[in-house]
Image (cartoon, coloured by chain):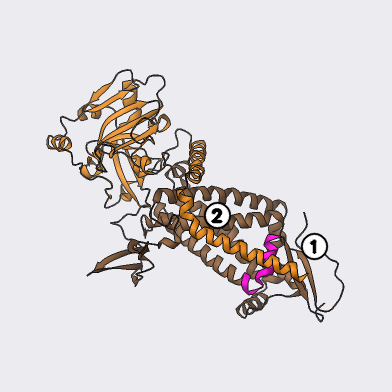
Chain colours: A brown, B orange
């Protein structure tokens, strides 16, 4: 298998030259797109499941009579029903999106709207089937990715920030560059920048394992097999809250990830994740 | 170089937009497609086998202390069966109520509450996890189902234990809205699987299934059948009502509710 940094063509010092390098190996590309598929369905079926009880609690238990820290719902106000989103003491009216939204032309009481749930109509049983199917696929896919990443040294070589990248001055420079949408060119584009590496590591070793573990903690069967799971997250109701928070952070990551992909060259990035080839441009002076 | 490049872009764009359109329009179609549903349902078997492998027969659900009890234990499903028969039983303080045990058993039984209380009892504080996502912690007292089954003696071929309830959760002409549930013998003989007549130190309240309900602590709330009237031991549950082994199972939920 070719290393991502292996150039396709030999480098000769020529001004303003476009060079294709091998960026992503086959395993990374396949697991990446399977992940896209899984996370999309997991999010949408997860929101279907959430809709069955759109309240979140902290602790070992939580039901309607207990204090929720997040609640989505609706209240009748005269003729019309109003949707709301509550977080702590804060209450925002969200009619049309959260609490009350359009389903086949009728305003329906539902936490998340039809266009973002699988299935679109209320069906907890079906939502659960989609969720668990893709949860299994996500876990198997993730195991392949992890084994490959350690075995082929993908994590160490491509994702572990180097010493120079972690220098505060360098990190600060990267943050400023990102804010101005200035991206590395030439040889500097051969490797991921430190912010990229850190966020990928946080997702691979933080958020995704957190998603899986908090998800498993909600299973009464697995709680019996691994009693420390519920304790680890402060109880099942807390695990459900953390599952929701981790999912929200993943959505945030994907939003920034896709925005950065577009800002730093949509076609080049997309091609590198499909065929593996990534173009870097050397401008004459820097070579 | 630029011509194939452009067409590749167009191809990518086409692929991406058609995938998007498919995802938006197709999800409900896929969800309602019987073949897709069959594939998705295979997950249940994977989950059951995986969990059984990890759980073994004896692994116990977490038990809690009295300090952990939910201040209010949400009552769900039927909270008062509305049949005349049940009303009469309730009026008589369930003195005339009998638990019928039949099917593939050597000695069919008709047990009164007093007789059930004569079995050695088990008290446990456990968490009830509803399929919807809420949970509540309560204390349950009752007789381990395994003891009652042993008293009746299982016949060869016995594989599932079916619980027939007094409540109709859905009004139907043919009675198919009557609540029922089923578990296999692994769960039936699990030490925490009890027929509970007490809750939080008192007699089981009507809203929670008086006079007797099932507790299968390693599974979700809809398995915890309330208002038990009859326990039937069978070799298969496919011949009962919708054939899926339970009221909610007949309406699309998984038979194995360990997740």
Q: Quadrant of residue A64?
A: bottom left
Q: The numbered mark 1 sits on a residue in which chain?
A: A
- Is the residue A77 above or below the residue B121 in the image? below
Look at 64% across and 52% down and name the residue there. A146
The residue pinned by badge 1 equals A6
The spot of residue A16 in percent (x, y) is: 80, 78
- Is the residue A270 above or below the residue B207 in the image? below
For label 1, the SS is loop
Look at 78% across and 67% down and name the residue there. A20
Look at 28% across and 20% down and name the residue there. B108
The region drawn magenta spans: A261-275
Specify whether B259 is left or right of A270: left
Sequence order check, earlier mark of 1 and 2:
1
Viewport quadrant of the N terminus of chain B: bottom right
Q: Main secondary structure of the magenta part?
A: helix
The residue pinned by badge 2 equals A38
Is A236 or A180 nearer to us in this picture?
A: A180
Viewport quadrant of the C terminus of chain B: top left
């Amino acid at each position: 298998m070719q290393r991502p940094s292996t150039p396709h063509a030999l480098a000769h010092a020529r001004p303003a030259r476009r060079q294709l390098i091998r960026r992503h190996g086959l395993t990374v590309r396949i697991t990446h797109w399977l992940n896209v598929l899984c996370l999309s369905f997991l999010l949408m079926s997860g929101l279907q499941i959430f809709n069955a009880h759109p309240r979140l609690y902290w602790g070992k238990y939580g039901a309607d009579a207990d204090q929720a820290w997040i609640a989505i719902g609706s209240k009748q106000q005269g003729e019309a029903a109003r949707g709301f989103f509550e977080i702590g003491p804060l209450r925002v009216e969200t009619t049309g999106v959260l609490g009350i939204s359009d389903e086949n032309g009728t305003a329906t009481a539902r936490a998340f709207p039809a266009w973002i749930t699988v299935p679109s109509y209320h069906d907890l049983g079906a939502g659960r089937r989609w969720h668990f199917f893709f949860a299994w696929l996500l876990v198997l896919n993730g195991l392949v990715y992890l084994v490959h990443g350690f075995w082929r040294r993908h994590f160490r070589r491509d994702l572990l920030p180097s010493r120079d990248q972690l220098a505060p001055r360098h990190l600060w420079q990267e943050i400023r560059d990102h804010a101005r949408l200035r991206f590395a060119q030439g040889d500097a584009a051969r490797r991921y920048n430190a912010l990229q590496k850190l966020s990928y590591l946080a997702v691979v070793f933080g958020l995704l394992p957190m998603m899986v573990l908090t998800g498993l903690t909600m299973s009464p069967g697995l709680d019996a097999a691994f009693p420390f799971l519920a304790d680890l997250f402060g109880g099942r109701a807390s695990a459900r809250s953390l599952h929701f928070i981790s999912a929200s952070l993943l959505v945030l990551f994907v939003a920034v990830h896709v925005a950065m992909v577009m800002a730093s060259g949509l076609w080049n990035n997309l091609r590198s994740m499909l065929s593996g080839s990534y173009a870097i441009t050397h401008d004459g002076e820097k070579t | 170089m630029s011509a194939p490049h452009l067409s590749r872009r167009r191809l990518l764009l086409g692929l991406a937009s058609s995938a998007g359109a498919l995802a938006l329009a197709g999800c409900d179609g896929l969800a309602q497609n019987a073949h897709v549903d069959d594939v998705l349902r295979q997950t249940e078997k994977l989950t059951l086998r995986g969990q059984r492998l990890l759980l073994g027969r004896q692994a116990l659900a977490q038990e809690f202390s009295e300090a952990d009890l939910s201040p209010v234990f949400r009552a769900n499903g039927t909270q008062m069966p509305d049949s005349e028969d049940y009303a009469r039983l309730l009026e008589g303080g369930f003195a005339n109520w009998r638990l019928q045990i039949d099917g593939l058993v050597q000695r069919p039984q008709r047990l009164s509450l007093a007789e059930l209380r004569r079995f050695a009892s088990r008290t446990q504080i456990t968490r009830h996890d509803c399929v919807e996502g809420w949970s509540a912690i309560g204390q349950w007292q009752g007789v381990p189902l395994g003891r009652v089954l042993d008293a009746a003696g299982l016949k060869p071929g016995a594989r599932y234990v079916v619980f027939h309830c007094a409540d109709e959760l859905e009004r139907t002409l043919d009675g198919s809205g009557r609540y029922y549930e089923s578990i296999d013998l692994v769960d039936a003989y699990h030490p925490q699987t009890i027929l509970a007549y007490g809750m939080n130190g008192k007699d089981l309240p009507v809203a929670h299934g008086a006079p007797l309900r099932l507790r299968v602590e390693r599974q979700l709330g809809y398995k915890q059948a309330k208002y038990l009237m009859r326990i039937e031991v069978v070799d298969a549950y496919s011949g009962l009502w919708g054939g899926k082994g339970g009221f909610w199972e007949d309406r699309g939920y998984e038979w194995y509710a360990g997740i």
